[in-house]
Structures are given as C-alpha cells and as structure tokens.
Amino acid sequence: MTSTLTRAGARTATPHRRTKSVRWRGSLIAWLFLAPALVLFLYFKFIPMGLGLWKSFHEVHYISDTWVGADNYKTILTDDAFGAAIWHSIVLALGTTVGSIVLGLGFALLIEGPARYLWFVRTAAFLPVVTTMAAVAEVWRIMFHPADSGMLNTIIGWVGVDPQPWLASENSSLWSIMLMSIWRGTPYDMMIFLAGLVGVDRTLYEAAAVDGASTWHRLRHITLPALRPVFWILFTLAAIRGLRVFVEVYVLTNGGPNGSSEVLMTLIYKLGFQSNELGVASAGGIVLFLATLALTVVVQLLRRRQAA
Amino acid sequence: MRFDSALGLESRRGPLATTGKVIVYGFMVIVFTGPLVGLLMSAFSKTLDPTSFSLWPDEFTLENFVQAKDKNVYLYLLNSFIVVGFGLLLQMLVSVFAAYSLARKKFRGMTFVMLLMLATMMLPEEIIAIPLSLVLADMPVFHTNLIGTYAGMILPVGAWGFSILVMTEFMKEVPVELEEAARIDGAGELRIFATIIVPLCRPALGVIGVFGFTMIWDQYLLPLIVAPESDMWTLPIALRSLRSDEEVGIGVLLAASLLALLPSIIAFLAFQRQFMRGLTSGAVKG
C-alpha cells in the first residue's frame, strides 16, 4: 500500500572476514537488546496464555487445582448463557465490521481530494477513533437516555421517529451498542480507505473518461478492484478485534437488560472476578482465542482464493 | 477535466454542487464530533439532569470541575498520568532496544522472535485477562504481588508488538555505511545505538510515542484487574463510579469524562502526521 515504512531499505550487510568469536559476540549483543521485550512478553503474554490453558482443564481453588478434563469446556458449550453470549458477540462483531466498512468507504469516496477544507473534515471526523473508549461510552450512555427528552430521542424526533428505549430494552440494547461502535469504527476504516485511494492509478480514470464511462462504471471497475487489499486488511483486523469487545458493553449495559447484550468477554469477566469460577472463565478465554484464530484463518483463506 | 478522486467531486462547481458539499461535509463533522462537542459544552454547564445534555451551553460554570475534586477525580487523573508516563517511557525504551536488534543484527532464531512478536499482536489481550490477573497476583520466580501497585499497570504494557515492528521497519532504512564508518572509528555498540541509530529514527519515535500514549491511556481491563481499591483507579475505570449521584447529577461525570478524553485528543492533534503514518503502516501489517 502507500506506507513509506514498508519500503524496506538495505538490510544490515554482513561485514567480511568475521571471526567466529565476533559473530558469537554479535548474537549475544542482539539477544541482550531483545531481552527486555522478551522478558515482558514472557511474563505478561506467554505465561498467562499457558496458565490459562492449564486452568481451563482444572477446577481452581485457593490452594490447589483439581483436574476436571474437558468439563469446563462442556459447561461453556452447553450453557445457555454462553451460547447467547457467543451469538451476541458474533452479531455485534459482524454488524460493526460491515457497518463501519460500508460507511467508511462511502465517506472516504466523498472526502477524497487534496483540498484544505477536506483535510479539516477528515481530522474532525477522525476524532472518535482516538478518544478514550470508557469516556465516549459514558457520553453515549447519556445520549441514549430513554426519556422522550433524551438527546438521541430528540434528534430522531425531528425527523418524525418515535422515541426509542435504546439501551433500556432487551430488543434494542445490542443494536444501540452496535450504533456506537460503528460511530467509532467508521472514521478508522475511512482513513484506511483514503490511504488506499491515493494508490489508485489516475491514468485509468482518464482512460475511462476518454471511453465515455460513467462515474458508476469508473467506481465499479477501477476504484473498487484497486481497493480490494484494503478490504482484506480491514476484515482481518475486524476478525482479530471483533469478538473480544468488552469496554463498550461493560460501560453501556454491562450485559443487560436481562442478558440481552451479554457478550463473551463480559461473561468471562463476571465468571472470573465476581463468581470466582476461574477454571470456566479460563476455558472461556481459550474458546474466544480459538474462535478468533479460526476467523483469522478463514479470512486469510478467502483472501488467497480471491487473489488466485 | 481533472481526475484527482474517484468521484471527481472536487472539480464540480456551481451553487448546487457547493450546497451539496456543504451539507454532506457539515453532516459528517456534526455526526462525528457532535457527541464530543456536546460533552465539552455540557461539562461547563449546570447540568443536573441527564436529558439536558446538549450542544449548546447554558449558564457557563466551573462548578462541575470544583465538585470533581471532592470525588477524587484529580487523584484518578494523577494515577492515569503516572501510569501513562512511566508506561510510555518503558514501552518506548523496550521497543527501541528490541528494534535495534531485529533491524540491525543477524542472529540465529531471529525469524522465531519475529513470529513471537506477531503472535502477541494476533492475541487480543482481553483473552488472557483472567490468567494475567493470577500471574500479577503471584509473579513466577519473584513471587511478588503486583495487584494494587502501579507496577502492575505499567509492566504489562511495557512491550508492545506494534511499536517494536514500526520501529524495526524504520531502523532498517538507516544506511549501513553510517554504522560501519562509526565502527571503523572505534565506536562501541551502545555508542552507535545511542548516537547514530536512535537520533536518525526520531520520526519513528513520534509515531510509537503517540500510539503508545493513546494505547496506554485507553487501557481499561488491565487497571480494572490491577486496582481493586479506589485509590489506585485510573480515570477511565473511575468514570463508572461517578455516574449516579443524586446531589450533583451528571455534572462531575461529564467533567471527568472530558478530562479523560482531552489528553488523547491533544496528543492526536499535536502529532497528526505521525499518527496517520503509523495508522497506515500498522494496518498493512495487521
């Protein structure tokens, strides 16, 4: 794509006439420079990952753990609450991804161009992405106030739509969360699309104009095909990020009302820190990991097939 | 006709096109900044009732920020700054050191290390939240308890795959000749690292700095796990507790939310170019 970073320069050339001890010293230095990162990763990524796997096969007590085999996983896969949470996670991830990509592409096309005022619009529109999730969610929670005089209800009232209960109803809580997530995800996707649009060959547009192609044809046959890699990047990112949603749900509804917006991570959090079911909660984490992994692999396979 | 963009909107002039553009762009700006502007306005208003949140201020007041003091908001803010300050310093140091090795050295196991870094980026941190809390409560080998300490919130964000990879890409571009010339002049490893490589990567330091800042500032689950007592809370996780208060309404919550939002917005506006650069490079790498 357009990144200036990926144009890899010359790799470190190996100086000639290296003796064995120099080379040995060279790798020692390399490992020393890497050590802080590796130790931190070991402690805060890899040990927790391994420990999570271990705990997921145990019933966890204060002093010792009892081996329970796949019982924790059975609990998860047969439990209705987990089933619902998995379903909500998928709906939320899918809805947010598709919504953000479609709107992001639309907005990117609308504000493509070098003009100064477009730069201003882009910057303003990008603000939601850099904001702190917890604070933004509090703001939306207030805007979602279900009273007739709540902010969003006032706004939809202007176009003649009846007041909605938003987060307060089992039927609309998940969709309301999705609305906020799309609001925050769209500008990000828009920026990535804009970066992709810069790379579209301008001479193709001119050639199309000479041939008398309409704007729609130009979009359909030149712009969109050129953006294909961008779509895959965004899908891959969404696959990694989508299912793990936590803060939005935790702040807006904490899974309620009546479990209607419970997602995997809020359920795992409750199990782990409120009911102290660490074994089941760990198994939940592993399931989430496997689901993320599977999704990433599927996206990559689809991408390969498309490319071939 | 010019073809600067797919839709060619920019070359369209005339009153109708201009009106259309004003409406579309105005709509975008309002949709995406509206909630933030609303927060800004309402935080300085006498807003007692959650439905009075609006884009227009009524009765300008600093009352909310004064009352925020009684609710310990500034203590939470201080905690946030402590965590982000030390966390970012550690993260940048760790990234620069690791990148130096990955970009400028050749050694056995390098591919493996690269794979490990990528694996940490593919692994959403939420997934390991539960076991991470167990590790923090009893660190292997050291047997210390980091729950309820700043270190517990700082050390886990110390190594970040994204920063390391961005830094590595930059460092690869520093010409080898510079390094070799210094080596011939008798400069040692640390000297080359500190006086040649790092200064040449200053733009990249801006990128990982601004990304690291927003990443650490936005941490939620980690402080939630590490800080069970309110005196260690960071501002984002304290917001929930400020929600419903009969006396002050939502005023304090709004003031605190604004304080939680401002630092990352300021960081973004100040380092926009670096931010965009990191955004596209990060996305390319997944």
Image (spheres, grey):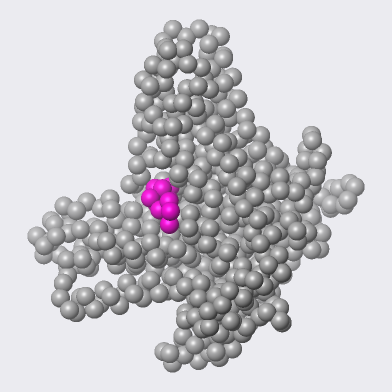
Residue A86 in sight in this render? no
Q: Nearer the viewer, residue A206 or B206?
A: B206
Q: Position of residue A243 (x, y in %)?
A: 58, 60
Which image quarter: residue B97?
Answer: top right
Residue at left offset 41%, top offset 32%? B200
Verify whether residue B6 appears in magenta: no
- Is residue B86 visible in the rendered image? The answer is yes
Is residue A298 toward the left or the right of residue A13 in the image?
right
Which residue sits at x=68%, y=60%?
A: B76
Residue B274 is a magenta residue? yes
Q: Nearer the viewer, residue A231 or A113?
A: A113
| Relative image position of residue B20 (x, y in whole percent) | 25, 77
Q: In the picture shown, does residue A229 fall above or below B117?
A: below
Instruction: Tell me how many marks there are.
Output: 0
Q: Which residues are magenta?
A: B269-278
Q: Residue at x 77, y 40 (%)?
A: B139
Q: Is residue A107 left or right of residue B171?
A: left
Looking at this view, name the residue that lies furthest to the right.
Answer: A63
| Dominant secondary structure (helix, strand or loop) of the stretch shown in magenta | helix
Q: Residue A39's quadrant in the figure?
A: top right
Q: Position of residue A239 (x, y in %)?
A: 52, 56
Residue A295 vertical placement versus B21 (above, below): above
**Residue A147: image location, x then y, percent:** 59, 89
- Residue drawn at x 62%, y 70% as measured from the top left: B65
